[in-house]
Amino acid sequence: MSESSGNSFTLPSVSNLEQSSIKSSDRQPKGRRKESLFMDSAGRKDVALTKAKAGELLAYLTEYGAENAKVECRKDNVPCLAFLAFYHVWAEQGLVVRTMNGGAACRFLKEGCRLTVEYTEKTLSSFLKSHYDRVDPKRIDDVRKMG
């Protein structure tokens, strides 16, 4: 009786394994790409607009003496309240989508504005989205007057 059943199996050579590992490391990461708060028409982050809007928010915080304040998940946190007011105005202007992407908002505050955020993206995202409709209209008017 022969042990060969017609199925053959060969191990890949070391050089083939090295090539396949090189190819896989050069690939783009799979999965959903993280969105930015401000996107250009091609669906990429609008770096110039992000920088400009971060500057506006930081100028507002400086005016109110809160430029060094931490972003905290509290109803009276000035950076959060200011961001939410600015988001309302940016949505009116068509610069951001009306339905807030909490992750993009959190990344904008941390990376774009370089504010100190000691919460996870998920926690801050939930807080911002749950307080979006609770912003004082007077604060939104103050933001409108700046621009």
Image (cartoon, rainbow, N blue to C red):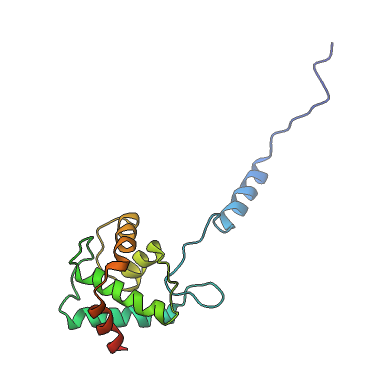
Q: Eyeballing the image, is 104 above or below 67?
A: above
Q: Position of residue 139 (x, y in %)?
A: 24, 78
Front residue of 82/2: it is 82
Q: Eyeballing the image, is 117 above or below 81?
A: above
**133 horizontally vs 2: left or right:** left
Outermost residue, top side: 1
Residue at screen point 82% across, 21% down: 5
Q: Position of residue 146 (x, y in %)?
A: 28, 88
Residue at screen point 36% across, 83% down: 52
Residue 123: image quadrant is bottom left
Front residue of 131/70: it is 131
Front residue of 8/42: it is 42
Q: Position of residue 147 (x, y in %)?
A: 32, 89
Residue at screen point 34% across, 60% down: 125
From the image, which quarter does the N terminus lie in?
top right
**31 horizontally vs 122: left or right:** right
Q: Position of residue 50 (x, y in %)?
A: 40, 77
